[in-house]
Image (cartoon, rainbow, N blue to C red):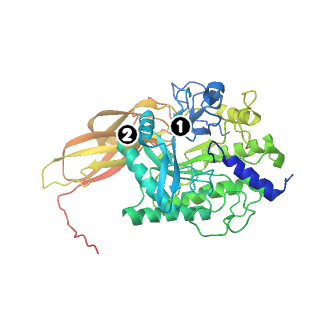
C-alpha cells in the first residue's frame, strides 16, 4: 500500500472528495527448553516505514516480530537478530505488453545474495490502478512473474517465490488473479509455479474511476472490465466479518486453483482511516486484537495449510511502524516510543509462549516409482518435516529416523539418524536416507521426529507418521496421446 507510501495522497484525497470531510491468545503449550523470554515469533510482522533508520531509532524488539518488509529488496540496516526480511520487487508496465522491475541487473543479484532462502514478493498491489502502486495488467504480471521466478531461483534455489500481493481478496480481484493464471498457462504451457501466496487485507471501496468519480479506495483492477467490485462505506473499514470472510474466500480460491498446499501470508493490513473519521486508538486496538486472535487460531482441515496445523494464515504484517499519515502507527513519530497501538501490539505478543510442533509431512522417493526385476534395489527416502509452532529462530537439532515397519512393534531402522532445525509457521526441512537392498513388495515406512522427546512440543502425538511404499516388479507403459 506504499510507494514510499505515496498512496496516502491518493487514498485520503479521494476520501475527502467523496466524504466531504466526513466527520491473547496465550499459548498454553510448553516452551522449547532453550527459548529465551521475549524471543521473536514467526507469525507477527510489521510494515517498516520511515526509511533506513526505523530499526536504529525505534526499539522493535518490544513487539517480538519475527519478520518485516520495507517495500524494497534490500534489508534495513541494524534490524534485530532473528528477524527475517521479506524482499519485494516492484513492477512497472511498459506499453501494452512490456514491463520493467526494480531492482534489476546487478542490484537484484546482490539483493538475492543478501537474503538467501527469503520469501520474495513479486509486485506490490499490482491490481491497484494509478501511479502509487504497481498497476500492471494480468498478462503483464504473468510475464514479469515468469521472468523473475526463473531469475531468482537460478541465483538462489532455496528462495521461495510468493505471488499476488493484491490489495484485498474480493471477487473482482480474484478475477484479476484468474486472468493472471490463465495468461501464464496460455503463454508458458504450464500452471504458474508458486511457493506461496501473499495478500493485503484492507477493507476498501472498489469503484472504477472511469465509471464514477466517487471512487475512493482500491478502484477496480487493471484488465478487469467491471464498473465496480464491493461497495464499502468508510465506517466498514474495521468490519471484522468482512476481514475473516475474505481470508476464507482466498483459501477456497487457492484450493480450487491447485494451491491449497501452499502457505498464505497477509503481508499488509490494518486500519487506514484516520482518528478524525471515527477510528481512535481504542477502535484500532480492538480490530488488531481480534485479528491476532483469529489468524493465530483459525484452522480448517479442508482449506488450511497442513504443514502448519491446517491454519488458514501462516504469517501476517501490521501496517505500520510509524506512518502516521495513515492510522495504525505503532511508534509515535515525535517521541519514537510505542504509541497506544504499539503498546497493544507489544502487550499481546508479550504473553505468547514460544512453542514447537514438529511432525513428518510428506515422503518422497528416488526413483519416484521404485521397480525391481526381482532382486533388492536402492531407494532414496526423503521426508519433509514441518514445524507448526511459532519460533522465528529455528529450533533443534531434532533427530529424524526412518523405519521399515512400526518402531513401536520392532520395526527396523533404515540408515542412520538425521537432523533438522526448524522455525515455526509451517517451515519445512528435508531429511533423507538411502535404503540399500530394499526388497520388492508393499512396505510400511515410518518417519519419526524427535524420538527421544528432546524438544518440548505442544503436540507430542504427531511425531510419527506411516507412509506406504510399493517396490513393484511389473510395469505398465501407457502411450501418451496428444493433439
User: In which quarter of the view is residue 412 placed?
Assistant: top left
Indicate whether 339 appears above or below 194: above
Tell me the SS state at disc 1: loop
- Seen at 58% across and 57% down, the residue is 127
Which of the two residues, 172 or 400, is positioned nearer the viewer here? 172
Q: Residue furthest right?
A: 23
Tell me the SS state at disc 2: strand
- Seen at 34% across and 48% down, the residue is 363
Which of the two residues, 122 or 288, is positioned nearer the viewer here? 122
User: In which quarter of the view is residue 210 placed?
Assistant: bottom right
Name the residue that disc number 2 marks: 448
Residue 260 visible to an observer of this rendering? no
Question: Residue 92 at x, y = what percent?
Answer: 53, 52
Residue 181 tag number: none
Question: Residue 332 at x, y = what percent?
Answer: 74, 32
Question: Residue 443 at x, y = what percent?
Answer: 27, 51
Residue 458 tag number: 1
Which of the two residues, 155 or 382, is positioned nearer the viewer here? 155
The image shows a total of numbered marks equal to 2
Left or right side of 197 for 288 = right
Instruction: Say if mark 1 contacts mark 2, CB within 8 Å.
Output: no
Mark 2 Cα shell of 10 Å, populated few (<14), some (14-19), many (≥20) = many
Question: Residue 121 at x, y = what percent?
Answer: 51, 46
Q: Quadrant of the C terminus?
A: bottom left
Q: Residue furthest bottom?
A: 483
Mark 1 Cα shell of 10 Å, populated few (<14), some (14-19), many (≥20) = some
- Seen at 46% across and 65% down, the residue is 182
Q: Earlier in the sequence, mark 1 or mark 2?
A: 2
Residue 174 visible to an observer of this rendering? yes
Left or right side of 417 for 65 = right
Amino acid at each position: 500500500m506504499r510507494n514510499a507510501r505515496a498512496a496516502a495522497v491518493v487514498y485520503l484525497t479521494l476520501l475527502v472528495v467523496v466524504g466531504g470531510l466526513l466527520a491473547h491468545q496465550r499459548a498454553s503449550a510448553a516452551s522449547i527448553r532453550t527459548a529465551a523470554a521475549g524471543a521473536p515469533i514467526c507469525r507477527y510482522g510489521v510494515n517498516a516505514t520511515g526509511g533506513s533508520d526505523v530499526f536504529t531509532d525505534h526499539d522493535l524488539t518490544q513487539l517480538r516480530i519475527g519478520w518485516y518488509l520495507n517495500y524494497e529488496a534490500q534489508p534495513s540496516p541494524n534490524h534485530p537478530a532473528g528477524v527475517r526480511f521479506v524482499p519485494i520487487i516492484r513492477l512497472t508496465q511498459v506499453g501494452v505488453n512490456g514491463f520493467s522491475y526494480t531492482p534489476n541487473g546487478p542490484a537484484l543479484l546482490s539483493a538475492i545474495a543478501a537474503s538467501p532462502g527469503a520469501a520474495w514478493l513479486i509486485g506490490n498491489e499490482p491490481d491497484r490502478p494509478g501511479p502509487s502502486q504497481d498497476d500492471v495488467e494480468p498478462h503483464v504480471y504473468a510475464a514479469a512473474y515468469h521472468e523473475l521466478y526463473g531469475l531468482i531461483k537460478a541465483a538462489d534455489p532455496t528462495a521461495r517465490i510468493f505471488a499476488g500481493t493484491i490489495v484485498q481478496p474480493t471477487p473482482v480481484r480474484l478475477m484479476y488473479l484468474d486472468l493472471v493464471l490463465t495468461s501464464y498457462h496460455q503463454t508458458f504451457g504450464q500452471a504458474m509455479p508458486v511457493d506461496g501466496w501473499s495478500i493485503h487485507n484492507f477493507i476498501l471501496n472498489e469503484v472504477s474511476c472511469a465509471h464514477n468519480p466517487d471512487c475512493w479506495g482500491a478502484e477496480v483492477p487493471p484488465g478487469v472490465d467491471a464498473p465496480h467490485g464491493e461497495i464499502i462505506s468508510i465506517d466498514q473499514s474495521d468490519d471484522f466479518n468482512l476481514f475473516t470472510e475474505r481470508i476464507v474466500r482466498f483459501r477456497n480460491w487457492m484450493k480450487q486453483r491447485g494451491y491449497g498446499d501452499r502457505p498464505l501470508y497477509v503481508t499488509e493490513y490494518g486500519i487506514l482511516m484516520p482518528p478524525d473519521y471515527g477510528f481512535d486508538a481504542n477502535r484500532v486496538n480492538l480490530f488488531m486484537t481480534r485479528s491476532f486472535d483469529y489468524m493465530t487460531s483459525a484452522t480448517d482441515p479442508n482449506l488450511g495449510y497442513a504443514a502448519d496445523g491446517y491454519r488458514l494464515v501462516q504469517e501476517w504484517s501490521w501496517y505500520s511502524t510509524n506512518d502516521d499519515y495513515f492510522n495504525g502507527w505503532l511508534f509515535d513519530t515525535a517521541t519514537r516510543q510505542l504509541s497506544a497501538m504499539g503498546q497493544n501490539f507489544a502487550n499481546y505478543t508479550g504473553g505468547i509462549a514460544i512453542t514447537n510442533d514438529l511432525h513428518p509431512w510428506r515422503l518422497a522417493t528416488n526413483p519416484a516409482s521404485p521397480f525391481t526385476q526381482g532382486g533388492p534395489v536402492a531407494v532414496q527416502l526423503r521426508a519433509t518435516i514441518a514445524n507448526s509452532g511459532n519460533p522465528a529462530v529455528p529450533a533443534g537439532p531434532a533427530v529424524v529416523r526412518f523405519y521399515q515397519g512400526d518402531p513401536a512393534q520392532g520395526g527396523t531402522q533404515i540408515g542412520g539418524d538425521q537432523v533438522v532445525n526448524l522455525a515455526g509457521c509451517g517451515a519445512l526441512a528435508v531429511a533423507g536416507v538411502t535404503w540399500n537392498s530394499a526388497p520388492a513388495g508393499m512396505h510400511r515406512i515410518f518417519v519419526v521426529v524427535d524420538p527421544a522427546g528432546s524438544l518440548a512440543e505442544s503436540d507430542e502425538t504427531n511425531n510419527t507418521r506411516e507412509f506406504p511404499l510399493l517396490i513393484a516388479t511389473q510395469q505398465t507403459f501407457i502411450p501418451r496421446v496428444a493433439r
